[in-house]
Image (cartoon, rainbow, N blue to C red):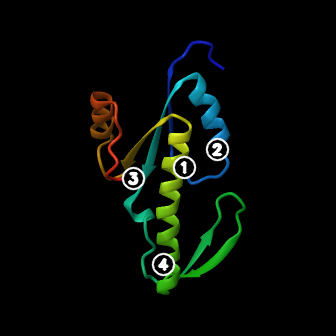
Amino acid sequence: MMKKRSITFLMSDFIDHNFEKALNIVGRRHDLIGIHIHDIREQELPSIGLVRFRDPETFQLKWIDTSRQDIRKTFSNWYVQHISNLKQTFIRSKADLISIQTDEPYTTALLNFFKTGVAEDNKL
């Protein structure tokens, strides 16, 4: 733990659970800025038929039929809810959150944030 107050950056896709307590601890002691890195293709599943997915944490394999509209809709709803929860988590932690897409220059989002002090909400 650093003794002096500082600006702390946390860069992640934030597709995880139970990190709120750590954010609160860091946010109380330092100015915390979360940088949410995401790919536009993460927002919805393409309709490409059966796809084998592996959970990166449990390594469990599962077949998903992405041609089913209900499956794609469920995933899309999950993503929207995930982003909403992420925003609320950062607000509760009194931390800022910047969103950067992988296909765009990161400098624009960072420069805008440091000029205005406000993260643009158009991509999150």
Q: Dot 2 corresponds to which residue? A: 19
Query: CA–CA distance between discs 1 and 2?
Result: 9 Å
Q: Earlier in the sequence, mark 1 or mark 2?
A: 1
Q: Is residue 115 above or below residue 11?
A: above
- Marks 1/2 in contact by CB < 8 Å: the verdict is yes
Confirm whether residue 13 shows in the render. Answer: no
Q: Position of residue 97 (x, y in %)?
A: 44, 40
Q: Residues within 10 Å of mark 1 (few under 14, many from 20)?
A: some
Q: Earlier in the sequence, mark 3 or mark 2?
A: 2
Q: Position of residue 52 (x, y in %)?
A: 59, 76
Confirm whether residue 70 shows in the render. Answer: yes
Q: Residue at x 28, y 31 (%)?
A: 116
Q: Earlier in the sequence, mark 3 or mark 4?
A: 4
Q: Dot 4 corresponds to which residue? A: 72
Q: Residue at x 56, y 54 (%)?
A: 15
Q: Residue furthest front?
A: 92
Q: Tag 1: residue type?
A: Phe
Query: CA–CA distance between discs 1 and 4?
Result: 21 Å
Q: Earlier in the sequence, mark 4 or mark 2?
A: 2
Query: CA–CA distance between discs 1 and 3?
Result: 12 Å
> How many numbered callouts?
4
Q: Dot 1 corresponds to which residue? A: 14
**Tag 4's secondary structure?**
helix
Residue 124: which disc? 3
**Tag 3's secondary structure?**
loop
